Image (spheres, rainbow, N blue to C red):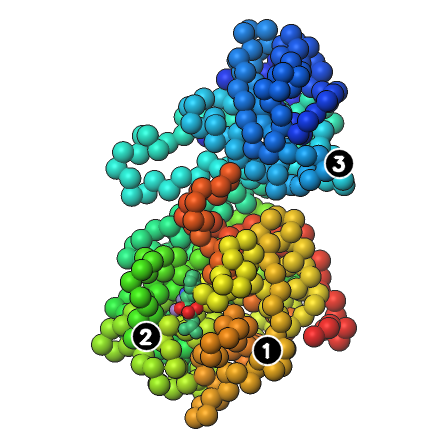
Amino acid sequence: MKLSVIFDAAEKVSTDVIIISLFENTKKIPSELNAINKASGGGISSLIQNGDFTGKLNETVIVPTDKKIVPKRVLLVGLGKSTDFSLDRVRQAAGTATGVIREKRFKNPSILLYGMEIKGISMEDVTRSVVEGILLSLYNFTMYKTLKKEEKTAITNYSIVVQRKEILGRVKSVTNRAQTVAEAVCFTRDIVNMAGSDATPTFLANKAKEIAKKPGVKCKILSSHEMKKLGMNGILNVSRGSSQPPKFIILEYNSKKKSNDTIVLIGKGVTFDSGGISLKPGANMDLMKADMSGAGAVLGAFKAFSSLKPSAHLVGLVPCTENMPGGSALKPGDIIKCMSGKTVEVLNTDAEGRLLLADALSYAKKYKPDAVIDIATLTGACVAALGTFASGMLGNNDELKNRVKQAGEECHERVWELPLWDEYQALIKSTIADIKNTGGKYAGTITAACFLKEFVGEFPWVHLDIAGTFLAEKNTPYIRKGASGVGVRLLTHLIQDWKKMPDASKRSS
Ligand code: BES
Ligand code: MN
Ligand code: ZN
């Protein structure tokens, strides 16, 4: 499918269907719709007057235009009350309308981009949201379907129509960038949705190598032999119960730009989490094929970086392994020495993610980073605390936390902060080793972050727990049931216009 931006009058676009969005209880047709409304013989205004379309969020109605105008049909989609307007509503409306178009198997739809520059929301933001709504809603995971034809969209060309020439250039460039991001999200959804036996550590390492074929991106894969030399015993011990070799992926973008901030992104890559010897219950264990969603987010972000060309120097660290209960598996009660030299009493082999992340955080030090963000499906407790609408955020630096929070609001991959107070740190002290890998029955998300904090160097750090957001349990206007691709939009949005962090001496803690 081709996505194009065209300058034309709405009533003159040659298209199966033109999508027009309207607020709830619109009394007066917006001036930019006057021409198409008039040309269609007052078709739009009479629908509103007759109450056949009220404009409730995600309400849709298709009206044939009886050759009065060039578009064959108009598809009205509701944006809800103008007072509740948000970019996510734009994304939802575009996704909902696109869903109708997909179902009806129209081939060359178009969507009118107009107005909406209210409440300080720019045309750029609206464009980005429309493009994301369209492309993300069209995502369909067909890899394992044998009858692919039915699954395929009929759309060949999707046009974004602007009626004002002066915004054409801006809309085009934002559309390109948003398309890059949306495609990266779909790439991530694909690898997360794949079966655990297919999306192995070796598979992810090969994907990273493919990403590194793009300009400006480099990739290095550490095998278990190299990890042994570095003392990465967190990841190595988790991998002991599995017959799949672990891989430590290192991606780098802009490695030569020393004048810019260095940001390290770390993604948990457990390609299947059975729990290990502390075996998980059977119900829903299949979902643990997606325990590499953090890894997926980092890989997806790197896929986008080469086109987005952010100014920062970016490093991706993605420790990948299975967590299996094989004969050589790590046992509850074992004590391991992580890369930093700290000893860990492993009380539960199902708390494996933090063991890999510990080594990655230690490895991050060598880049002298200005910011480190790790993203991981780390704790079931995070789902209990925040549900499915927010990722958990914990960290040691207010500036970085604020940036992540703001980026999350702007792209609607929202995060919510949990405290990392000193008192919690005591919960992971071990009697026989330095620390233990579980913190008791309360505040599981916080004690997991406390564990990570033990390995964080003198750098600003944010931990994102995506255990509640990595999967959609049902279809929504632009996320299909299955992997959500969470993190790709958040990380790319955060980083694409990255401003240097304040000097270390001025940093808050
Ligand atoms: N991958 C899981 C966390 C998880 C659970 C992610 C549900 C997504 C949905 C993680 O490795 C895990 O098993 N965590 C344990 C930690 C506990 C043993 C301290 C948990 O949350 O139960
Ligand atoms: Mn686990
Ligand atoms: Zn896990």
- Is ligand 1 within 8 Å of the beta carbon of the residue shown at mark 2? yes
Q: Residue at x 31, y 60 (%)?
A: 283
Alpha carbons under labels 1 and 3: distance apart: 44 Å
Image point (34%, 58%), residue name: 284
Residue 22 image point, x, y percent = 65, 27
Quadrant of the picture in which ligand 1 is shown = bottom left
Determine crowd level at label 3: few under 14, some 14-19, many 20+ residues with C-alpha closer than 10 A: few
Tag 1: residue type?
Gly
Q: Between tags 2 and 1, which lies in front?
A: 2
Q: Residue at x 51, y 75 (%)?
A: 442
Name the image quarter holding residue 25.
top right
- Mark 1 or mark 3: which is in front? 3
Q: Which mark is residue 118?
A: 3
Above/below status of 13 relative to 336: above
- The C terminus sits in image quarter: bottom right
**Residue type marked 2:** Ser
Residue 436 against residue 323 in the figure, above or below: below
Left or right of 277: which side holds 175?
right
What residue did someone put label 2 on? 278
- Viewed as shown, does residue 234 lie left or right of 134? left
Q: Residues within 10 Å of mark 1 (few under 14, many from 20)?
A: some
Q: Residue 128 falls in which quadrant of the image?
A: top right
Q: Amino acid at mark 3?
A: Ile
Q: Secondary structure at mark 3?
A: loop
Q: Residue furthest front?
A: 51
Relative depth, front residue between 432 and 262: 432
Residue 31 position in % (x across, y down): 75, 20
Which residue in the structure is indicated by mark 1? 457
Q: Residue at x 59, y 78 (%)?
A: 457
Placement of 169 over or under 260, stated as above or below = above
Q: How many marks?
A: 3
The quarter of the picture where residue 49 lies is top right
